[in-house]
Image (tube, grey):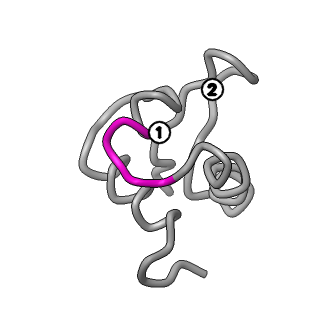
């Protein structure tokens, strides 16, 4: 569940507003969350099916996962 003032909301808003694949650094440079909070948040978004991850560890890219 996504609530106000939730870093997941900021990540999703960024990915929805920008089409394509983005690195962690791309995303973190545009939103205000700590790198410590990043990992748990992005993993949860991927697990919940909101975000698609391409690649592993360094060099991973992320985009909003469209539902068909």
Crowding near the residue tagged with mark 1, few <14, some 14–19, many ≥20 C-alpha atoms within 10 Å: many
To which residue does mark 1 refer? 63
Instruction: Give how far across and how far down residue 62 sits, in percent.
Output: 53, 35
Residue 68 vs 39, above or below: the answer is: below
Crowding near the residue tagged with mark 2, few <14, some 14–19, many ≥20 C-alpha atoms within 10 Å: some
Q: Are marks 2 and 1 in contact (CB under 8 Å)?
A: yes
Residue 5 vs 20, above or below: the answer is: below
Which residue range is magenta in the image?
28-33
Q: Nearer the viewer, residue 31 or 67?
A: 31
Magenta region includes residue 64? no
Q: What's the distance in space between the residues labelled 2 and 1, CA to CA?
A: 9 Å
Image position of 9 (left or right of 8): left
To which residue does mark 2 refer? 54
Query: Secondary structure of the magenta portion, mostly?
Result: loop
Which residue of the protein is positioned furthest toward the left in this rendering? 17
Instruction: Give how far across and how far down residue 49 sits, in percent.
Output: 64, 57
């Amino acid at each position: 569940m996504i609530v106000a003032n939730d870093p997941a909301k900021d990540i999703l808003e960024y990915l929805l507003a920008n089409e394509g694949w983005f690195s962690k650094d791309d995303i973190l440079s545009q939103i205000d969350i700590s790198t410590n909070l990043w990992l748990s948040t992005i993993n949860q978004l991927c697990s919940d099916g909101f975000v698609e991850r391409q690649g592993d560890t360094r060099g991973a890219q992320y985009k909003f996962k469209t539902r068909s």
